[in-house]
Amino acid sequence: MNSKTCDIAIIGGGIIGCGLAESLALEGLDVVLLERGVIGREASWAAAGMLAPQSEMEEPGEWFDFCLAARRCFPETVERLRDSASIDPQYRDEGMLYVAFNEDEERTLLKRAAWQRRCGVQSEILDASELARRESAVSDSIRMAVRFVEDHCLDPRLMTQAYAISARRAGADLREMTPVHRVLIDGDRVVGVELPGETIHAQSVVLAGGCWSGLIAGLPFALPIHPVKGQMLLLQCATPQFSCTLHSRNIYLVPRFDGRVIVGATEEHDAGFDKSVFAGAVSDLLSASYAVVPALREAAAAETWAGLRPGTPDRRPIMGPSPVEGLVLATGHFRNGILLAPLTAQLITEYIVSGSLPETLGPFGIERFGAASAPARKLGV
Ligand code: FAD
Ligand code: GLY
């Protein structure tokens, strides 16, 4: 069997693994990333690309604050990737309009805007006529909307590719069609990973395998990650119909610059690893999208797909040390892995390089599910 030695082996080539490969390689570490399929073709490919803590988080607290901090990483990260990878992730900063069709939805939205205002996070309340003035394509059945000015979006497929290219340029070895069969552990320390016909010896291993993270052989602890299916569709309009993401209670519509609209998504916790797209889901997504923008009836139905979010029991990621020394967790990003990718890369890199856990990662440890975590290894060069 062949063997190789490196500083860090990363399992999984989604946005989380690729972001980390880039940032660890930029620190001068010798990084090998192992992807069993094609880089960036699972959840990170299926995602809409909303960077939307104000629209998606339900209450104030450390989780909301963490997601706001994640959002702040974007403009700079996108700018840097444009240069280092020569890929433009199509970042859009026009904000997000969350619409209400009835009094009950209006009340819920106003409550959300109010608690966020108390946290110092701003939004704008638009009545129906102001909404119609700003976005003429929206339905006149909409009663009002709240505009979350700083909730932005980008194309997650391009962002993941940009990370992968930039990681390679920084010296990381990113391998496709390379499944990790087993994590290798000696006593209570990780020593590497086993591939078909090859062993990679590594000082640290990062587990970033998305919803498959808990299935890798050799883990001596349970990782509570499960797949949460999201069915999506893509509509192609001849010209752009609206200028920012539109969100209703049932649906989101994310516009791309060229007239495409991503329509999402189902949230299915009991579909296992199945990625079929069903007629009923497509029909529900279409009906909900016409309710918000009636002209979408005239759009071409361009594509459907489903992806598997890495879900956890409390809907938050699992990041930081594991019960095995040197085995680092960067997984379970559920509905927010695109939003969280740059901050995850930054904080996990800081942890690996310095050997001390950044305070902001504290709430996301595996200990909250009853597993003890091992001491860190410092890998700074
Ligand atoms: P993945 O992208 O799934 O990557 C994991 C990789 O690990 C895969 O490529 C897999 O092949 C590989 N792997 C697994 N096991 C092994 C092994 N043994 N050996 C080698 N490789 C392995 N987030 C947002 O922030 N905004 C959104 O708008 C948004 N919309 C979404 C819409 C949908 C429909 C879905 C499904 C998700 C959405 N998300 C969104 C969530 C986001 O996509 C995920 O949180 C994020 O992509 C997770 O990234 P990841 O790298 O952990 O996982
Ligand atoms: N964050 C959107 C989704 O997961 O569908």
Image (tube, grey):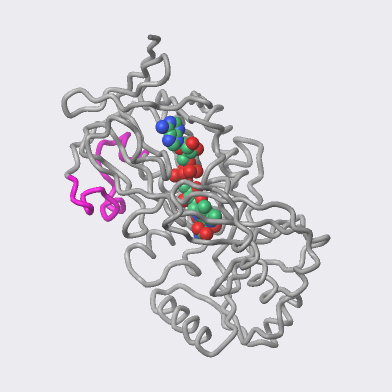
Give the image quarter of residue 263. bottom right
Query: Looking at the image, is 303 positioned above or below residue 378?
Result: below
Q: Which residues are magenta?
A: 349-371
Q: Position of residue 237 (x, y in %)?
A: 79, 61
For the N terminus, the image quarter is top left
Q: Quadrant of the C terminus?
A: top left
Q: Position of residue 162 (x, y in %)?
A: 59, 38
Q: Is residue 136 visible in this depiction of the protein? A: yes
Does 358 appear in magenta?
Answer: yes
Position in image of residue 187 (x %, y %): 16, 25
Q: Quadrant of residue 40?
A: top right
Regarding residue 51, the answer to whether it shows in the image is: no
Q: How many marks?
A: 0
Q: Is residue 102 left or right of residue 268?
A: right
Left or right of 246 on screen, residue 364 = left
User: In terms of image quadrants, where is residue 95?
Assistant: bottom right
Residue furthest toward the front? Answer: 279
Q: Majority secondary structure of the magenta segment?
A: helix
Is 259 situated above or below 166?
below
Residue drawn at point x = 56 percent, y = 41 percent: 160
Report x, y in % for residue 197.
42, 14
Q: Residue at point 57% right, 49% down?
A: 276
Q: Which of 273 and 68 lies nearest the eye of the viewer?
A: 273
Which residue lies at the image location 40% right of the left edge and 39% below the top edge? 208
Residue at the right extreme?
A: 238
Whether residue 74 appears in magenta in the rendering, the answer is: no
Can you say whether 378 is above or below 301 in the image? above
Residue extending farthest to the top is 1
